[in-house]
Image: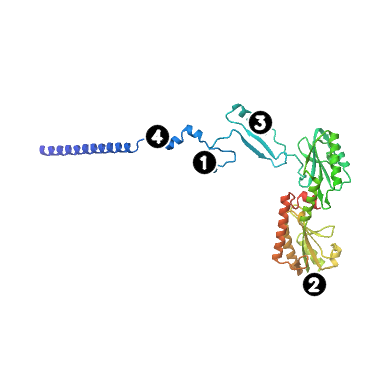
Amino acid sequence: MNKLNDLTISLLAIGFGLIVLVILFNWWQERKMRKTAEKQFSTPQSDVLMDDFSADAFEENAVLIDSSTKIKDVVDRYDTQDVHLPDEVEFKIDLGESDRDDEVTTQAPNVAAAETHTEAEESFQIADEHPVNRNLLPDAVNKEVDLTALFFLPTPVNGERLRQFLISLVNLDKPIFAYGLDTSQVWHPLTREQETVEFTKAAYCLQLADRAGAVSAETLQRFQQMVTEIAYELSAQVEWIGTQDPLEYAQSLDAFCLEVDQVVGLHLINGTGGRFTGTKFRGLAEANGLTMKEDGAFYAQSKSGQSSFKVINMENNPFSSEMLKSVALKGVTFQLEIALTESCTETFNSMVLMAKSMGHSLSATLVDDHQRELNDAKIEKIRQQLKLIQVQMTVKGIAPGSPVALRLFV
Protein backbone atom coordinates (compact mmCIF):
# COMPACT_ATOMS: atom_id res chain seq x y z
CA MET A 1 0.00 0.00 0.00
CA ASN A 2 2.78 2.38 0.93
CA LYS A 3 4.62 1.43 -2.25
CA LEU A 4 1.55 2.28 -4.31
CA ASN A 5 1.23 5.69 -2.71
CA ASP A 6 4.90 6.50 -3.33
CA LEU A 7 4.55 5.54 -7.01
CA THR A 8 1.49 7.74 -7.41
CA ILE A 9 3.20 10.74 -5.81
CA SER A 10 6.26 10.26 -8.02
CA LEU A 11 4.17 10.19 -11.18
CA LEU A 12 2.27 13.32 -10.16
CA ALA A 13 5.53 15.15 -9.46
CA ILE A 14 6.93 14.16 -12.84
CA GLY A 15 3.73 15.28 -14.61
CA PHE A 16 3.68 18.62 -12.80
CA GLY A 17 7.32 19.17 -13.71
CA LEU A 18 6.61 18.49 -17.39
CA ILE A 19 3.78 21.00 -17.37
CA VAL A 20 5.99 23.66 -15.86
CA LEU A 21 8.65 22.99 -18.48
CA VAL A 22 6.11 23.31 -21.32
CA ILE A 23 4.85 26.62 -19.93
CA LEU A 24 8.36 27.98 -19.58
CA PHE A 25 9.24 26.85 -23.12
CA ASN A 26 6.17 28.55 -24.61
CA TRP A 27 6.87 31.79 -22.72
CA TRP A 28 10.45 31.79 -24.01
CA GLN A 29 9.34 31.18 -27.61
CA GLU A 30 6.74 33.98 -27.42
CA ARG A 31 9.25 36.43 -26.00
CA LYS A 32 11.73 35.59 -28.76
CA MET A 33 9.14 36.12 -31.51
CA ARG A 34 8.01 39.47 -30.03
CA LYS A 35 11.59 40.81 -30.06
CA THR A 36 12.03 39.70 -33.67
CA ALA A 37 8.80 41.43 -34.73
CA GLU A 38 9.78 44.66 -32.99
CA LYS A 39 13.09 44.71 -34.83
CA GLN A 40 11.34 44.16 -38.22
CA PHE A 41 8.53 46.78 -37.78
CA SER A 42 10.23 49.50 -35.82
CA THR A 43 8.98 53.10 -36.54
CA PRO A 44 11.29 55.04 -38.95
CA GLN A 45 12.70 58.38 -37.96
CA SER A 46 11.02 60.09 -40.98
CA ASP A 47 8.10 59.13 -43.22
CA VAL A 48 7.97 60.65 -46.68
CA LEU A 49 4.21 60.26 -47.00
CA MET A 50 3.47 61.63 -43.56
CA ASP A 51 5.90 64.52 -44.05
CA ASP A 52 4.17 65.52 -47.30
CA PHE A 53 0.81 65.69 -45.54
CA SER A 54 1.82 67.59 -42.44
CA ALA A 55 -0.46 70.45 -41.41
CA ASP A 56 1.91 73.15 -42.68
CA ALA A 57 2.53 71.37 -45.94
CA PHE A 58 -1.19 70.88 -46.53
CA GLU A 59 -1.83 74.59 -46.18
CA GLU A 60 0.93 75.29 -48.70
CA ASN A 61 -0.30 72.67 -51.18
CA ALA A 62 -4.04 73.31 -50.87
CA VAL A 63 -6.08 72.70 -54.05
CA LEU A 64 -7.82 75.67 -55.71
CA ILE A 65 -11.60 75.09 -55.91
CA ASP A 66 -13.84 77.62 -57.55
CA SER A 67 -17.64 77.58 -57.49
CA SER A 68 -17.91 75.65 -60.78
CA THR A 69 -15.37 72.88 -60.00
CA LYS A 70 -16.65 69.33 -59.47
CA ILE A 71 -15.16 67.03 -56.87
CA LYS A 72 -14.02 64.54 -59.50
CA ASP A 73 -12.16 67.32 -61.36
CA VAL A 74 -10.25 68.21 -58.21
CA VAL A 75 -9.29 64.58 -57.61
CA ASP A 76 -8.14 64.10 -61.21
CA ARG A 77 -5.87 67.16 -61.23
CA TYR A 78 -4.65 67.27 -57.62
CA ASP A 79 -1.06 66.49 -58.57
CA THR A 80 -0.70 69.50 -60.88
CA GLN A 81 -2.76 72.28 -59.25
CA ASP A 82 -3.03 73.95 -55.91
CA VAL A 83 -6.35 74.42 -54.15
CA HIS A 84 -7.31 77.58 -52.27
CA LEU A 85 -10.76 78.47 -51.11
CA PRO A 86 -11.67 81.80 -52.77
CA ASP A 87 -12.43 84.76 -50.60
CA GLU A 88 -15.59 85.49 -52.61
CA VAL A 89 -17.99 83.16 -54.38
CA GLU A 90 -20.55 84.54 -56.85
CA PHE A 91 -24.08 83.12 -56.78
CA LYS A 92 -26.40 83.69 -59.76
CA ILE A 93 -30.13 83.11 -59.39
CA ASP A 94 -32.14 82.76 -62.60
CA LEU A 95 -35.66 84.10 -62.10
CA GLY A 96 -36.73 83.55 -65.70
CA GLU A 97 -38.99 86.57 -65.88
CA SER A 98 -37.35 89.40 -67.78
CA ASP A 99 -34.07 90.76 -69.02
CA ARG A 100 -34.00 93.16 -66.11
CA ASP A 101 -34.77 90.59 -63.43
CA ASP A 102 -33.23 87.60 -65.18
CA GLU A 103 -30.25 87.55 -62.85
CA VAL A 104 -29.78 88.52 -59.24
CA THR A 105 -26.14 88.60 -58.16
CA THR A 106 -24.80 88.68 -54.64
CA GLN A 107 -21.36 88.03 -53.24
CA ALA A 108 -20.81 85.66 -50.38
CA PRO A 109 -18.42 87.29 -47.90
CA ASN A 110 -15.09 86.06 -46.62
CA VAL A 111 -15.88 83.72 -43.73
CA ALA A 112 -12.84 85.04 -41.89
CA ALA A 113 -14.51 88.45 -41.48
CA ALA A 114 -17.21 88.07 -38.83
CA GLU A 115 -18.68 91.52 -39.36
CA THR A 116 -19.08 91.06 -43.12
CA HIS A 117 -20.61 87.65 -42.53
CA THR A 118 -23.23 89.17 -40.25
CA GLU A 119 -24.10 91.79 -42.86
CA ALA A 120 -24.52 89.08 -45.47
CA GLU A 121 -26.92 87.16 -43.22
CA GLU A 122 -28.98 90.31 -42.75
CA SER A 123 -29.08 90.97 -46.52
CA PHE A 124 -30.36 87.47 -47.21
CA GLN A 125 -33.03 87.89 -44.54
CA ILE A 126 -34.20 91.10 -46.19
CA ALA A 127 -34.36 89.32 -49.55
CA ASP A 128 -36.62 86.68 -47.99
CA GLU A 129 -38.91 89.29 -46.47
CA HIS A 130 -39.12 91.26 -49.74
CA PRO A 131 -39.10 88.76 -52.61
CA VAL A 132 -38.17 89.93 -56.10
CA ASN A 133 -41.20 91.16 -58.07
CA ARG A 134 -42.05 88.50 -60.63
CA ASN A 135 -44.87 90.53 -62.22
CA LEU A 136 -42.74 92.77 -64.41
CA LEU A 137 -45.15 92.31 -67.35
CA PRO A 138 -48.67 90.89 -67.75
CA ASP A 139 -48.85 87.25 -68.82
CA ALA A 140 -50.67 88.22 -72.03
CA VAL A 141 -47.71 90.34 -73.20
CA ASN A 142 -45.12 88.58 -75.36
CA LYS A 143 -41.72 90.18 -75.97
CA GLU A 144 -41.42 88.29 -79.27
CA VAL A 145 -44.54 89.98 -80.65
CA ASP A 146 -45.16 93.22 -78.72
CA LEU A 147 -43.33 96.49 -78.24
CA THR A 148 -44.15 97.51 -74.66
CA ALA A 149 -43.85 100.82 -72.84
CA LEU A 150 -43.76 100.14 -69.10
CA PHE A 151 -44.71 103.15 -66.95
CA PHE A 152 -43.46 103.50 -63.37
CA LEU A 153 -46.02 105.86 -61.84
CA PRO A 154 -44.81 108.22 -59.07
CA THR A 155 -48.29 108.10 -57.47
CA PRO A 156 -51.20 105.69 -58.04
CA VAL A 157 -53.44 106.54 -61.01
CA ASN A 158 -56.98 105.26 -61.48
CA GLY A 159 -58.01 103.10 -64.40
CA GLU A 160 -60.30 105.71 -65.93
CA ARG A 161 -57.46 108.14 -66.55
CA LEU A 162 -55.22 105.43 -67.96
CA ARG A 163 -58.01 104.31 -70.31
CA GLN A 164 -58.35 107.84 -71.68
CA PHE A 165 -54.81 107.59 -73.03
CA LEU A 166 -55.66 104.26 -74.66
CA ILE A 167 -58.76 105.73 -76.34
CA SER A 168 -56.60 108.45 -77.88
CA LEU A 169 -54.55 105.77 -79.68
CA VAL A 170 -56.99 105.31 -82.57
CA ASN A 171 -56.71 104.71 -86.31
CA LEU A 172 -53.60 102.57 -85.96
CA ASP A 173 -53.07 99.60 -88.27
CA LYS A 174 -52.06 97.27 -85.42
CA PRO A 175 -53.73 96.39 -82.09
CA ILE A 176 -52.87 98.28 -78.88
CA PHE A 177 -53.27 96.64 -75.47
CA ALA A 178 -53.14 98.36 -72.07
CA TYR A 179 -52.76 96.93 -68.57
CA GLY A 180 -52.47 98.27 -65.03
CA LEU A 181 -50.69 96.83 -61.98
CA ASP A 182 -52.75 97.34 -58.83
CA THR A 183 -51.48 97.74 -55.26
CA SER A 184 -51.75 93.97 -54.76
CA GLN A 185 -49.22 93.43 -57.57
CA VAL A 186 -51.83 91.98 -59.95
CA TRP A 187 -52.10 93.00 -63.59
CA HIS A 188 -55.51 93.88 -65.07
CA PRO A 189 -56.58 94.83 -68.60
CA LEU A 190 -57.67 98.47 -68.62
CA THR A 191 -61.41 97.94 -69.12
CA ARG A 192 -64.43 99.86 -67.86
CA GLU A 193 -64.64 97.50 -64.88
CA GLN A 194 -61.21 98.73 -63.72
CA GLU A 195 -61.86 102.48 -63.92
CA THR A 196 -61.98 102.99 -60.15
CA VAL A 197 -58.96 100.80 -59.39
CA GLU A 198 -55.70 102.52 -58.41
CA PHE A 199 -52.63 101.37 -60.35
CA THR A 200 -48.94 101.79 -59.58
CA LYS A 201 -47.68 100.71 -63.00
CA ALA A 202 -49.11 100.72 -66.50
CA ALA A 203 -48.12 98.90 -69.69
CA TYR A 204 -49.09 99.94 -73.23
CA CYS A 205 -48.28 97.33 -75.88
CA LEU A 206 -48.17 97.61 -79.66
CA GLN A 207 -48.47 94.34 -81.61
CA LEU A 208 -45.76 94.40 -84.27
CA ALA A 209 -47.34 92.09 -86.86
CA ASP A 210 -50.46 90.12 -87.78
CA ARG A 211 -51.87 88.44 -90.88
CA ALA A 212 -52.15 91.86 -92.54
CA GLY A 213 -48.37 92.30 -92.36
CA ALA A 214 -45.78 94.15 -90.29
CA VAL A 215 -46.42 97.39 -88.41
CA SER A 216 -45.95 100.51 -90.49
CA ALA A 217 -43.36 103.18 -89.74
CA GLU A 218 -46.15 105.74 -89.29
CA THR A 219 -47.96 103.63 -86.68
CA LEU A 220 -44.75 102.95 -84.81
CA GLN A 221 -43.88 106.65 -84.75
CA ARG A 222 -47.34 107.64 -83.52
CA PHE A 223 -47.23 105.05 -80.76
CA GLN A 224 -43.81 106.19 -79.54
CA GLN A 225 -44.91 109.84 -79.63
CA MET A 226 -48.07 109.05 -77.64
CA VAL A 227 -46.02 107.19 -75.02
CA THR A 228 -43.83 110.27 -74.62
CA GLU A 229 -46.90 112.44 -74.10
CA ILE A 230 -48.41 110.04 -71.55
CA ALA A 231 -45.13 109.92 -69.59
CA TYR A 232 -45.07 113.74 -69.51
CA GLU A 233 -48.70 113.96 -68.33
CA LEU A 234 -48.14 111.44 -65.53
CA SER A 235 -44.57 112.46 -64.64
CA ALA A 236 -43.76 108.79 -65.08
CA GLN A 237 -40.56 106.98 -65.90
CA VAL A 238 -40.82 104.78 -69.01
CA GLU A 239 -38.93 101.59 -69.78
CA TRP A 240 -39.15 100.22 -73.31
CA ILE A 241 -39.27 96.43 -73.51
CA GLY A 242 -38.58 94.96 -76.92
CA THR A 243 -36.03 95.12 -79.71
CA GLN A 244 -33.82 98.12 -80.40
CA ASP A 245 -35.07 98.37 -83.99
CA PRO A 246 -38.82 97.58 -83.80
CA LEU A 247 -39.53 98.29 -87.47
CA GLU A 248 -36.86 95.94 -88.79
CA TYR A 249 -37.81 93.30 -86.24
CA ALA A 250 -41.50 93.58 -87.21
CA GLN A 251 -40.61 92.86 -90.82
CA SER A 252 -38.58 89.77 -89.87
CA LEU A 253 -41.43 88.62 -87.61
CA ASP A 254 -43.87 89.01 -90.49
CA ALA A 255 -41.57 86.96 -92.75
CA PHE A 256 -41.41 84.22 -90.11
CA CYS A 257 -45.20 84.19 -89.79
CA LEU A 258 -45.60 83.85 -93.56
CA GLU A 259 -43.25 80.87 -93.50
CA VAL A 260 -45.08 78.92 -90.79
CA ASP A 261 -48.64 79.95 -91.67
CA GLN A 262 -49.41 76.65 -93.39
CA VAL A 263 -52.65 74.70 -93.86
CA VAL A 264 -52.76 70.90 -94.05
CA GLY A 265 -55.54 69.67 -96.33
CA LEU A 266 -56.82 66.13 -96.84
CA HIS A 267 -59.64 65.47 -99.32
CA LEU A 268 -62.26 62.75 -99.49
CA ILE A 269 -63.55 62.45 -103.06
CA ASN A 270 -66.15 60.22 -104.64
CA GLY A 271 -64.80 56.76 -105.20
CA THR A 272 -66.31 53.64 -106.72
CA GLY A 273 -69.72 54.54 -105.34
CA GLY A 274 -69.84 57.94 -107.11
CA ARG A 275 -71.03 60.98 -105.17
CA PHE A 276 -72.16 60.48 -101.58
CA THR A 277 -75.27 62.00 -100.11
CA GLY A 278 -75.20 65.00 -97.80
CA THR A 279 -77.39 63.28 -95.23
CA LYS A 280 -74.99 60.32 -94.94
CA PHE A 281 -72.01 62.66 -94.64
CA ARG A 282 -73.73 64.75 -91.96
CA GLY A 283 -74.64 61.65 -89.97
CA LEU A 284 -71.03 60.44 -90.03
CA ALA A 285 -69.68 63.91 -89.16
CA GLU A 286 -71.93 64.30 -86.12
CA ALA A 287 -71.21 60.72 -85.03
CA ASN A 288 -67.50 61.65 -84.97
CA GLY A 289 -68.13 64.70 -82.76
CA LEU A 290 -68.05 67.38 -85.50
CA THR A 291 -70.32 70.41 -85.11
CA MET A 292 -71.60 72.58 -87.95
CA LYS A 293 -71.18 76.32 -87.32
CA GLU A 294 -72.56 79.48 -88.92
CA ASP A 295 -69.80 79.68 -91.53
CA GLY A 296 -71.03 76.40 -93.05
CA ALA A 297 -68.16 74.17 -91.90
CA PHE A 298 -68.02 71.24 -89.48
CA TYR A 299 -65.55 71.74 -86.63
CA ALA A 300 -63.73 69.40 -84.27
CA GLN A 301 -62.88 70.70 -80.82
CA SER A 302 -59.88 70.08 -78.58
CA LYS A 303 -60.16 69.13 -74.92
CA SER A 304 -59.88 72.82 -74.00
CA GLY A 305 -62.84 73.68 -76.24
CA GLN A 306 -60.71 75.30 -78.94
CA SER A 307 -61.43 74.45 -82.59
CA SER A 308 -58.79 72.04 -83.84
CA PHE A 309 -59.67 71.29 -87.47
CA LYS A 310 -62.64 71.69 -89.80
CA VAL A 311 -64.36 69.92 -92.69
CA ILE A 312 -65.63 72.00 -95.61
CA ASN A 313 -67.31 71.36 -98.95
CA MET A 314 -64.80 70.79 -101.77
CA GLU A 315 -67.02 72.78 -104.13
CA ASN A 316 -66.74 75.90 -101.92
CA ASN A 317 -70.45 75.82 -101.18
CA PRO A 318 -70.99 76.22 -97.40
CA PHE A 319 -72.93 73.47 -95.72
CA SER A 320 -76.41 74.12 -94.41
CA SER A 321 -79.07 71.87 -93.00
CA GLU A 322 -81.36 72.32 -96.00
CA MET A 323 -78.58 71.82 -98.54
CA LEU A 324 -77.34 68.60 -96.95
CA LYS A 325 -80.80 67.09 -97.17
CA SER A 326 -80.89 67.26 -100.95
CA VAL A 327 -77.34 67.44 -102.32
CA ALA A 328 -74.94 64.74 -103.44
CA LEU A 329 -71.40 65.75 -102.55
CA LYS A 330 -68.41 65.40 -104.84
CA GLY A 331 -66.07 65.52 -101.88
CA VAL A 332 -65.11 67.17 -98.60
CA THR A 333 -61.86 68.68 -97.32
CA PHE A 334 -60.32 68.23 -93.87
CA GLN A 335 -58.30 71.37 -93.00
CA LEU A 336 -55.86 72.00 -90.15
CA GLU A 337 -54.19 75.40 -89.67
CA ILE A 338 -50.90 74.56 -87.97
CA ALA A 339 -50.29 77.94 -86.29
CA LEU A 340 -53.77 78.00 -84.74
CA THR A 341 -53.85 74.41 -83.50
CA GLU A 342 -52.64 73.42 -80.04
CA SER A 343 -50.97 69.98 -79.90
CA CYS A 344 -51.07 70.07 -83.68
CA THR A 345 -49.24 66.75 -84.21
CA GLU A 346 -51.76 64.85 -82.10
CA THR A 347 -54.60 66.75 -83.76
CA PHE A 348 -53.28 65.82 -87.20
CA ASN A 349 -53.21 62.15 -86.19
CA SER A 350 -56.82 62.37 -85.02
CA MET A 351 -57.85 64.09 -88.25
CA VAL A 352 -56.23 61.40 -90.41
CA LEU A 353 -57.93 58.61 -88.47
CA MET A 354 -61.31 60.33 -88.78
CA ALA A 355 -60.86 60.97 -92.52
CA LYS A 356 -59.91 57.33 -93.14
CA SER A 357 -62.86 56.07 -91.12
CA MET A 358 -65.37 58.33 -92.87
CA GLY A 359 -63.80 57.55 -96.24
CA HIS A 360 -64.32 53.84 -95.64
CA SER A 361 -67.98 54.40 -94.73
CA LEU A 362 -68.58 56.68 -97.75
CA SER A 363 -66.58 54.48 -100.19
CA ALA A 364 -64.48 57.59 -100.83
CA THR A 365 -60.76 57.99 -101.56
CA LEU A 366 -58.34 60.06 -99.46
CA VAL A 367 -56.23 62.34 -101.73
CA ASP A 368 -53.92 65.36 -101.52
CA ASP A 369 -54.33 68.79 -103.12
CA HIS A 370 -53.26 67.37 -106.50
CA GLN A 371 -55.90 64.60 -106.38
CA ARG A 372 -53.22 61.96 -105.77
CA GLU A 373 -54.12 59.17 -103.40
CA LEU A 374 -52.55 59.51 -99.96
CA ASN A 375 -50.86 56.38 -98.66
CA ASP A 376 -49.23 55.99 -95.25
CA ALA A 377 -45.79 57.05 -96.54
CA LYS A 378 -47.11 60.35 -97.90
CA ILE A 379 -49.08 60.98 -94.71
CA GLU A 380 -45.93 60.42 -92.66
CA LYS A 381 -44.07 62.96 -94.83
CA ILE A 382 -46.77 65.54 -94.09
CA ARG A 383 -46.54 64.70 -90.39
CA GLN A 384 -42.78 65.32 -90.33
CA GLN A 385 -43.18 68.70 -92.07
CA LEU A 386 -45.84 69.64 -89.54
CA LYS A 387 -43.55 68.68 -86.65
CA LEU A 388 -40.80 70.88 -88.07
CA ILE A 389 -43.09 73.92 -88.16
CA GLN A 390 -44.27 73.17 -84.63
CA VAL A 391 -40.67 73.12 -83.36
CA GLN A 392 -39.81 76.36 -85.20
CA MET A 393 -42.76 78.19 -83.64
CA THR A 394 -42.09 76.83 -80.16
CA VAL A 395 -38.42 77.87 -80.29
CA LYS A 396 -39.54 81.33 -81.43
CA GLY A 397 -41.74 81.59 -78.33
CA ILE A 398 -44.99 81.41 -80.31
CA ALA A 399 -46.30 77.89 -79.69
CA PRO A 400 -49.05 76.76 -82.10
CA GLY A 401 -52.51 77.39 -80.67
CA SER A 402 -51.18 79.61 -77.85
CA PRO A 403 -52.88 82.95 -77.08
CA VAL A 404 -50.07 84.89 -78.77
CA ALA A 405 -50.35 82.67 -81.87
CA LEU A 406 -54.07 83.33 -82.01
CA ARG A 407 -53.33 87.07 -81.97
CA LEU A 408 -50.87 86.73 -84.85
CA PHE A 409 -52.73 84.39 -87.15
CA VAL A 410 -56.44 85.11 -86.67
Q: Position of residue 242 (x, y in %)?
A: 77, 43
Left or right of 41 on screen, residue 337:
right
Residue beneath disc 1:
80
Residue type marked 3: Ser
Tag 1 or tag 4, which sits nearer the N-term?
4
Q: Badge 1: how crowded within 10 Å, few (<14), some, or many (20+)?
A: few
Mark nearer the viewer, 3 or 1: 1
Q: Nearer the viewer, residue 367 or 146?
A: 146
From what the image shows, is residue 125 above or below residue 80? above
Mark nearer the viewer, 2 or 3: 3
Residue type marked 1: Thr
Q: Place residue 26 in its image quadrant.
A: top left
Residue beneath disc 2:
274
Residue beneath disc 3:
123
SS at mark 3 in the image: helix
Q: Position of residue 214 (x, y in %)?
A: 82, 50
Tag 1 or tag 3, which sits nearer the N-term?
1
SS at mark 1 in the image: loop
Q: Badge 4: how crowded within 10 Å, few (<14), some, or many (20+)?
A: few
Callout 3–callout 4 Cβ contact below 8 Å: no
Residue beneath disc 4:
46
